[in-house]
Image (cartoon, grey):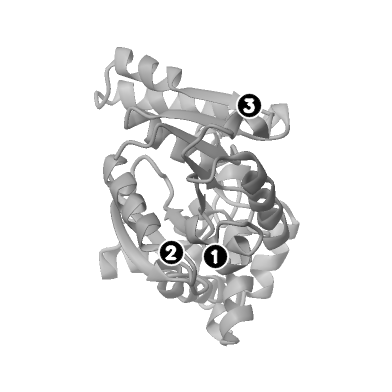
Amino acid sequence: MNEALVGIVGAGMMGTGIAETAARADTTVVLYEPAIDPLERSRERLGVSLTRTVDRGHLSALDADQIRARVSWTSDLDDLAAASVVIEAVKEDVAVKRDVFARLDRIVGPETLLLSNTSSIPIAELAAATERPDRVAGLHFFSPVPVMKLVEIVVALETSDETVARLERFASTLGKRAVRTKDRSGFIVNFLLVPYLMSAVRMVEEGFATREDIDEGMKLGCGHPMGPLALADMIGLDVLYGVGVSLHGEFQKPEYAPPPLLKRMVAAGRLGRKSGRGFFDYAPAAVAA
């Protein structure tokens, strides 16, 4: 099922990646952000991603131009009114997300699915801000979205079977493998992943091992394609911190609690690849990616 028009709220790395993925699947996309500067950065980020894909021989220049033409950027939320699916990809703040869902509920049609890309916030809290809880679910993508094949479909208490079926068809058209999960903080992947990443941060904090040896150990010893600290940098240390706070709040288990080092790195603006510096330093080209 190719949904006619996909709206995306939030033009950051995840929102732009979702937009590119949907546009590659011959879907028209409207990407919303209230401020102009993030929209321009999103437009540039999409161009860089498509150019890189063309340079690697995985896409023709003509196809790249057609994908780019399927995406439009707007600072007017009303431009998403005709969307059959809207995916929220704003920061991990429940108040911000609830406000987005409440506003969308008043704008879009009754059959429109309202989805969240949240990695930790309970979907039931977002659905409660709407008059259509049966059409609210989580659709959690992984970074970088055009590359990673998995999406998690998060089924809340009121999510209908029809909504789940639509989402599974939609995920298939995007070229993604969908897995279902119940609505609890962290879902499947982050429930397992976050304690692992927090353990790596604690090792650095305690001087147990160097950042390089920690990452090399997991790559060469466990066959992981990327070490935990480099992965944390790619996710974004602010995002990781927020997910850890959410998980710890729900389960009250120490393995989910963000270490003090992580909190201080976020406060210092060391957010990982997107800021140019996290546990490792990154060249400007890596940041633009």
Residue found farthest to the bottom:
253
What residue type is disc 1 on? Ile
Is 22 left, or right, of 265 in this rendering? left
What residue type is disc 2 on? Val
Earlier-in-chain disc, 2 versus 1: 1
Q: Give the alpha-carbon distance from disc 1 to disc 3, as whole Å.
A: 26 Å
Name the secondary structure under disc 2. Answer: strand
Residue highlighted by disc 3? 74
State yes or no: discs 2 and 1 in contact (Cβ < 8 Å). Answer: yes
Image coordinates of residue 250 in percent, x first then y, are 59, 80
State yes or no: discs 1 and 3 in contact (Cβ < 8 Å). Answer: no
Res 202 quadrant in image: bottom right
Name the secondary structure under disc 1. Answer: helix
Q: Which mark is residue 69?
A: none
Earlier-in-chain disc, 2 versus 3: 3
Res 144 quadrant in image: top left
Image coordinates of residue 191 in percent, x first then y, are 45, 74
Residue highlighted by disc 1? 123
Mark 3 neighbour class, 10 Å CA radius: few under 14, some 14 to 19, many 20 or more? some
Q: Residue 80 versus residue 201: which sits nearer the camera? A: 80
- Compared with residue 192, is residue 229 higher up or lower down, i.e. above or below? above
Q: Give the alpha-carbon distance from disc 2 to disc 1, as whole Å.
A: 7 Å
What residue type is disc 3 on? Thr
Q: Quadrant of the N terminus?
A: top left
Mark 2 neighbour class, 10 Å CA radius: few under 14, some 14 to 19, many 20 or more? many
Q: Residue 47 versus residue 91: which sits nearer the camera? A: 91
Residue ID at (46%, 39%): 84
Mark 1 neighbour class, 10 Å CA radius: few under 14, some 14 to 19, many 20 or more? many
Image coordinates of residue 207 in percent, x first then y, are 57, 75
Q: Can residue 212 be seen at all in this image of the molecule?
A: yes
Q: Give the alpha-carbon distance from disc 2 to disc 3, as whole Å.
A: 28 Å
Q: Which mark is residue 154?
A: 2
